[in-house]
Image (spheres, rainbow, N blue to C red):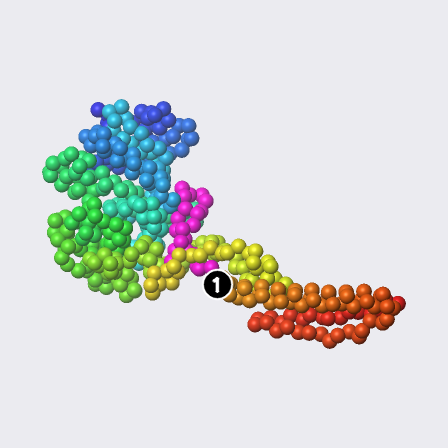
């Protein structure tokens, strides 16, 4: 047995001929995290190992499947997975990006509660990650401050990474083949009752993305107050509070806008139909409460995503161009009572794309107006052809007889519903 907490490897060993294990950086009830170095790419990585005692064949398959699922989440706010594999004893491991910073649980412990704007900034980024995860069919089910890692961008702005996606799914009894005592221990480590929705406490399998939105509210309450929305001396008491009591009021513990308290209470509503239904809706509600820097950043990203509008003028000169103009893309319809929500965007420099702000495109030209314009154009063209035919016939007769041509006829104006087309009926002068 090695020195790295339950796996048959030691510091200095090289895994898969490319990952040199440097030091232990984290340890939990089901696994450990080791800082390592990719020898070929010369870059730091983090490797998460599942403890050998849990590495049954079914657990291995589930672990690898979850790693692939994380790789499918296109968000810069989800930790990136580079590789997966197994040790000689079939214990699985997952190679991820190495993060420098602190998780929010440690920040709360060392620094205390965050100013409400900073807390909102962090949770807006979590909403972006959840939006992409939910779109990929993944429900986290274990959102808590310890699973939200705070790093910083080059400009010093906060950058939150969501880690441990879907790990709680490994704890299904049919996969573990464990007895009640073993299941209780596992859930004590990975299940977090103070952040879990009531329906998840009753049955962790029968949940959807709205359970994650409950967790966002519970985490946000703690970030601002330093306390839990549902207190209890133990996980059992906390679970009972979640199931039977209303959350504590934010105003009793922190100075924050009433709107923030209302948002948190909506997240923590026991009736799932009364909560925010999507991460986009929740982010839209939180946006006005974010810091100025975050709002400006969101505005810039929105402007970058907006497509240039195409205004089609209804007149004879442009009607053919209008008929060839490609239709603009429609943005998703917002939820009732809400302004247009976040829509996904793609950004370079990160592991994938994340949801950004976008507004609906300009109104498109109605088909009825276009048909009217085409009708006017056809009518004008018909008049022109008739005049041309008549004039040509007269000229042929005059040329044959040697007579002078008739005087020019007056101008005729055809009025349409939105334009005026002037047609000049002028035969011109007779040839000498």
User: Which class describes the residues within 10 Å of circle 1: few (<14), some (14-19), or many (20+)?
Assistant: few
Q: Residue at x 54, y 64 (%)?
A: 371
For the question of whether residue 246 can be seen, the reply is yes
State yes or no: residue 357 in magenta. Answer: yes
Q: Residue at x 14, y 39 (%)?
A: 183
Q: Which residue is mark 1?
A: 363
Q: Up-down: is 424 above or below 196?
A: below
**Residue 104 relative to residue 412: left or right:** left
Rendered location of residue 375, percent (x, y): 58, 66
> Where, by quadrant of the figure, is residue 277 drawn?
bottom left
Q: Residue at x 26, y 55 (%)?
A: 217
Reply above or below: 86 against 378: above
Question: What is the quadrant of the N terminus in the image?
Answer: top left
Would you say 151 lies left or right of 266 here? Answer: right
> For the residue labelled by badge 1, is the local secondary structure a helix, a strand or a loop?
loop
Find residue 71 and report its horizontal and vertical position in percent: 35, 39
| Towards the viewer: 144 or 430 | 430
Q: Which residues are magenta?
A: 341-362
**Quarter of the figure with the C terminus:** bottom right
Question: Which quarter of the figure has residue 332?
Answer: bottom left
């Amino acid at each position: 047995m090695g020195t790295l907490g339950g796996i048959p490897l030691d510091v200095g060993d090289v895994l898969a001929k490319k990952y040199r294990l440097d030091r232990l950086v984290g340890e939990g009830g089901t696994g450990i995290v080791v800082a390592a170095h990719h020898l070929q790419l010369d870059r730091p990585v983090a490797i998460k190992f599942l403890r050998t005692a849990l590495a049954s064949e079914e657990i291995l398959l589930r672990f690898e499947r979850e790693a692939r699922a994380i790789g499918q989440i296109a968000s810069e706010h989800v930790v990136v997975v580079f590789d997966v594999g197994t040790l000689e004893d079939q214990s699985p491991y997952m190679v991820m990006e190495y993060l420098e910073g602190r998780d929010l649980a440690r920040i709360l412990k060392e620094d205390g509660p965050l100013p409400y704007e900073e807390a909102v900034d962090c949770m807006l980024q979590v909403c972006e990650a959840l939006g992409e995860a939910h779109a990929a069919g993944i429900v986290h089910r274990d959102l808590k401050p310890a699973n939200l890692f705070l790093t910083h961008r080059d400009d010093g702005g906060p950058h939150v990474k969501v880690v441990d996606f879907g790990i709680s799914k490994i704890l299904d009894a049919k996969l573990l083949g464990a007895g009640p005592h073993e299941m209780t221990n596992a859930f004590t480590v990975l299940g977090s009752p103070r952040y879990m929705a009531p329906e998840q406490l009753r049955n962790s399998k029968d949940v959807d993305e709205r359970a994650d939105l409950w967790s966002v509210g519970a985490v946000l309450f703690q970030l601002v107050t330093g306390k839990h929305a549902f207190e209890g001396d133990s996980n059992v008491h906390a679970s009972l509070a979640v199931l039977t009591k209303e959350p504590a009021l934010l105003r009793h513990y922190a100075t924050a806008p009433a709107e923030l308290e209302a948002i948190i209470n909506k997240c923590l509503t026991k009736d799932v139909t009364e909560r925010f239904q999507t991460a986009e809706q929740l982010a839209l509600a939180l946006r006005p409460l974010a810091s100025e820097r975050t709002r400006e950043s969101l505005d810039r990203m929105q402007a970058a995503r907006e497509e240039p509008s195409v205004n089609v003028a209804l007149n004879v000169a442009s009607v053919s161009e209008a008929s060839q103009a490609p239709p603009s893309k429609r943005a998703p319809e917002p939820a009732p009572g809400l302004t247009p929500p976040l829509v996904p965007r793609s950004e370079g420099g990160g592991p994938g794309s994340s949801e950004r702000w976008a507004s609906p495109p300009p109104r498109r030209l109605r088909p009825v107006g276009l048909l009217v314009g085409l009708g006017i154009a056809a009518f004008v063209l018909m008049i022109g052809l008739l005049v041309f035919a008549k004039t040509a016939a007269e000229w042929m007769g005059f040329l044959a007889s040697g007579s002078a041509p008739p005087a020019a006829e007056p101008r005729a104006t055809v009025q349409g519903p939105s334009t005026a087309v002037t047609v000049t009926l002028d035969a011109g002068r007779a040839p000498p």
